Image: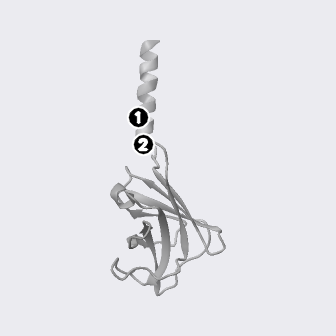
Amino acid sequence: MYEQLKAQIKHLQTKLQVLPQVRYVSVLLDAQQRAALLITFDPSAGALQLQRLNNVAEGPEDSMQVWALSGDSKPRSLGLVLSRYKTLQVPAKLEDLTGVTELAISVEEKGGVSDAQGPRLPYLFKGWLVQKAI
């Protein structure tokens, strides 16, 4: 019985290692407060997972850019939404989200803008970043 229990624990530990361990969640809302984008972050994957919840897409001369917002600090770019698919990933590290309270999406010129230039306002989508309990 002891060996069987030990084998089950080992099996479950192995399963846990391959399952996504989502640490952060954000639902970005549009101007009418409708859900537009679901963003999750799993540090082991090293990427923000974005899932479009509406059909809004950038034009041929535009790029949608993801921003990290921290109170009164300057917005920091986390990257570009480079796919028209419903789900996509943007490379990110755990440090990129430290101290961040909100995430936002802006529409920028093709290729995006630098942190120094900053995003166009108002944001297309915006939402609180929630850290899940571990």
The residue type indicated by label 1 comes to Thr
Q: Position of residue 118 (x, y in %)?
A: 39, 80
Q: Position of residue 67 (x, y in %)?
A: 43, 70
Residue type, mark 2 in image: Val
**In terms of depth relative to the viewer, which is nearer, 109 or 71?**
71
Viewer-proximal residue among 6 and 113: 113
Provide the secondary structure element on which disc 1 rests. helix
Against 114, residue 46 (above or below) is: above
Q: Residue at x 46, y 83 (%)?
A: 120
Asked if the residues shown at circle 1 and circle 2 are in contact, with their CB atoms under 8 angstroms apart, the answer is yes
The number of discs equals 2
Q: How is the image coloured?
A: one colour
Left of 92 or right of it: where is 34? right
Residue nearer the viewer, 102 or 113: 102
Left or right: where 126 falls relative to 23: right
Residue drawn at point x = 39 percent, y = 70 percent: 73
Residue under the point 44% across and 25% down? 9
Q: Outermost residue toward the front?
A: 72
Instruction: State whether residue 9 is above or below residue 70.
Output: above
Q: Is 92 located above or below residue 66 in the figure? A: above
Q: Mark 2 — residue?
A: 18
Q: Mark 1 to mark 2: distance in Å?
A: 7 Å
Q: Residues within 10 Å of mark 1 (few under 14, many from 20)?
A: few
The numbered mark at residue 14 is 1
The structure residue drawn at horizontal position 44% and vertical position 38%, both measured from the top left corner, is 16
